[in-house]
Image (spheres, grey):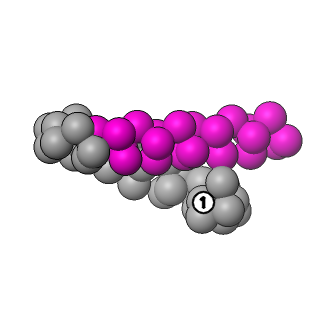
């Protein structure tokens, strides 16, 4: 489970950074895609007992 936890936290962190970059660039379509992916990752984390906000 340790590798899964580490990977989900990395994915959340990277996706959040990509979301911020897309917003800064004014790319609404890409920002929406990253926001959707981030929601999915948070859902996966929560389903597995991982606090997605401490990534």
Specify the quadrant that holds the N terminus: top right
Q: Secondary structure at mark 1?
A: helix
User: Going by the image, does 53 lie left or right of 2?
Assistant: left
**Nearer to the camera, 29 or 7:** 29
Furthest residue toward right: 2
User: Is residue 33 something one can see in this rendering?
Assistant: no
Look at 55% across and 45% down and name the residue there: 12
Circle 1 sits on which residue?
52
Residue at the image point whose x is 60% and y is 54% from the top: 45
Which quarter shows the C terminus?
bottom right
Where in the figure is residue 52, as x and y percent of width and height? 60, 60
Q: Main secondary structure of the magenta part?
A: helix
Identify the magenta region: 1-22
Q: Is residue 14 above or below residue 52?
A: above
Task: Name the quadrant containing residue 34.
Answer: top left
- Looking at the image, residue 55 sits to the left or right of residue 34; the answer is right
> In this orientation, does residue 30 appear?
yes
| Residue displayed at 53% across by 37% down | 14
Residue 21 covered by magenta stretch: yes
Count of numbered badges drawn on the protein: 1
Looking at the image, residue 29 sits to the left or right of residue 25; the answer is: left
Q: Does 50 appear in magenta?
A: no
**Dot 1, crowdedness within 10 Å: few (<14), some or many (≥20)?**
some
Seen from the viewer's position, the closer of residues 15 and 52 is 15
Compared to residue 52, the image places residue 38 above or below, namely above
Determine the image quadrant of residue 28. Answer: top left
Q: Residue at x 46, y 42 (%)?
A: 17
Q: In the rendering, at what x and y percent does residue 10 appear?
A: 64, 39
């Amino acid at each position: 489970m340790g590798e899964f936890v580490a990977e989900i936290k990395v994915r959340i962190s990277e996706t959040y950074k990509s979301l911020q970059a897309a917003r800064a660039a004014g790319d609404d379509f890409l920002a929406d895609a990253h926001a959707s992916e981030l929601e999915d990752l948070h859902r996966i984390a929560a389903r597995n007992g991982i606090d997605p906000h401490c990534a």
